[in-house]
């Protein structure tokens, strides 16, 4: 009986250890999504698809914005010889919407930046390398500050899109590019940051020769590019209210 009592206590201790270890493993597997706030993010584009989990997309460390447990990611979907921009939202780890249909032409486009106020104001930054027949961003840019990529092709212009954060639909967009001095064709512009003051959207970018003024025409510049360029838009992207660049006027 003495040995039996010792064995009983021994096995009871093992059972308790198993239960504690099991609880620990279960807790680790079902850890909740942590709340966070990220209003703006611009960076190198990453590739993913609408079928990927949030964990898989987050592991790529691409641009994202967050409010509480809601997160929005931007990037591109890789095809054999083409990239199409993609934007996706998760609520507490569950996909709410995914849009990979903004631009589906041969334009080699990506998404590389976001601004979100956590409520109803969401802007996305995308790249465009030219205009081709089919669904492209120009269908959202009609009547906005710059309605198309313009002449030429190859250099990366930017597209800024106002997006409905509830469903991912693009409400409107504008192109943002520079112009080559010799032939007026579109030249490269890379957005570095977005900020929002409740009325205007301010864009900071690197612009190659030459940046555009508020009237979309080329500014006069000296020195070499890229230029540090700052432009402010009304919320509907119809009007650029100010534009400036170092050594340009």
Image (cartoon, rainbow, N blue to C red):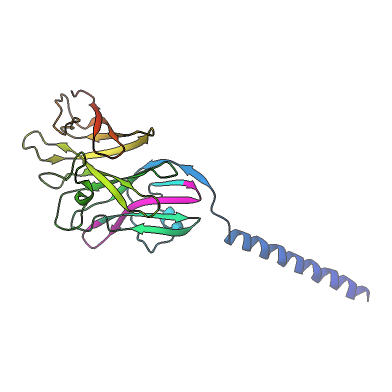
Is 168 or 54 nearer to us in this picture? 168
The quadrant in which the C terminus is found is top left
Q: Position of residue 89 (x, y in %)?
A: 41, 54
Residue 213 horizontal side relative to residue 85, left or right? left
* Residue at x-position 19% and y-position 35%: 208
Residue 76 horizontal side relative to residue 95, left or right? left
The quadrant in which the N terminus is found is bottom right
Is 83 or 217 nearer to us in this picture? 217
Quarter of the rendering containing residue 49: bottom left
Is 89 or 247 nearer to us in this picture? 89
Q: How many marks?
A: 0
Q: Position of residue 114 (x, y in %)?
A: 36, 44
Task: Judge whether residue 44 can be spotted in this image.
Answer: no
* Residue at x-position 19% and y-position 49%: 138
* Residue at x-position 25% and y-position 34%: 206
Prevailing secondary structure of the magenta residues: strand
Residue 28 horizontal side relative to residue 225, left or right? right
Is 74 or 163 nearer to us in this picture? 163
Vertical side of 183 occupied by 245: above or below: above
Vertical side of 180 occupied by 224: above or below: above
Q: Residue furthest toward the right?
A: 1
User: Which stretch is magenta?
Assistant: 67-83
Vertical side of 19 occupied by 140: above or below: above
Q: Position of residue 53 (x, y in %)?
A: 43, 61
Q: Position of residue 145 (x, y in %)?
A: 21, 38
* Residue at x-position 21% and y-position 32%: 226
Whether 126 is among the magenta residues is no
Whether 74 is among the magenta residues is yes
Task: Judge whether residue 53 can be spotted in this image.
Answer: yes
């Amino acid at each position: 009986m003495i040995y039996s009592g010792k064995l009983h206590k021994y096995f009871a201790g093992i059972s308790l250890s198993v239960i504690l270890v099991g609880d620990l493993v279960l807790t680790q597997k079902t850890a909740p999504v942590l709340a966070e706030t990220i209003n703006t993010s611009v960076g190198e584009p990453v590739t993913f698809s609408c079928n990927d989990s949030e964990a898989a997309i987050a592991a790529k460390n691409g641009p994202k914005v967050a409010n509480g447990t809601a997160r929005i990611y931007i990037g591109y979907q890789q095809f054999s010889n083409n990239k199409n921009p993609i934007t996706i939202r998760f609520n507490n780890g569950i996909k709410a919407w995914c849009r990979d249909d903004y631009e589906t032409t041969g334009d080699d486009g990506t998404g590389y930046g976001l601004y979100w106020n956590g409520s109803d104001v969401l802007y996305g930054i995308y790249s465009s390398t030219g205009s081709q027949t089919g669904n492209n961003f120009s269908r959202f840019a009609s009547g906005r500050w710059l309605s198309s990529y313009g002449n030429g092709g190859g250099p990366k212009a930017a597209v800024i899109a106002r997006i409905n954060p509830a469903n991912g639909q693009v409400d409107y967009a504008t192109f943002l590019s520079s112009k080559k001095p010799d032939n007026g064709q579109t030249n490269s512009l890379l957005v570095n940051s977005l900020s929002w003051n409740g009325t205007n959207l301010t864009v900071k970018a690197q612009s190659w020769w030459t940046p555009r003024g508020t009237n979309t025409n080329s500014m006069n510049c000296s020195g070499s590019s890229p230029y540090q360029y700052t432009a402010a838009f009304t919320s509907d992207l119809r009007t650029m209210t100010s534009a400036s660049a170092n050594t340009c006027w």
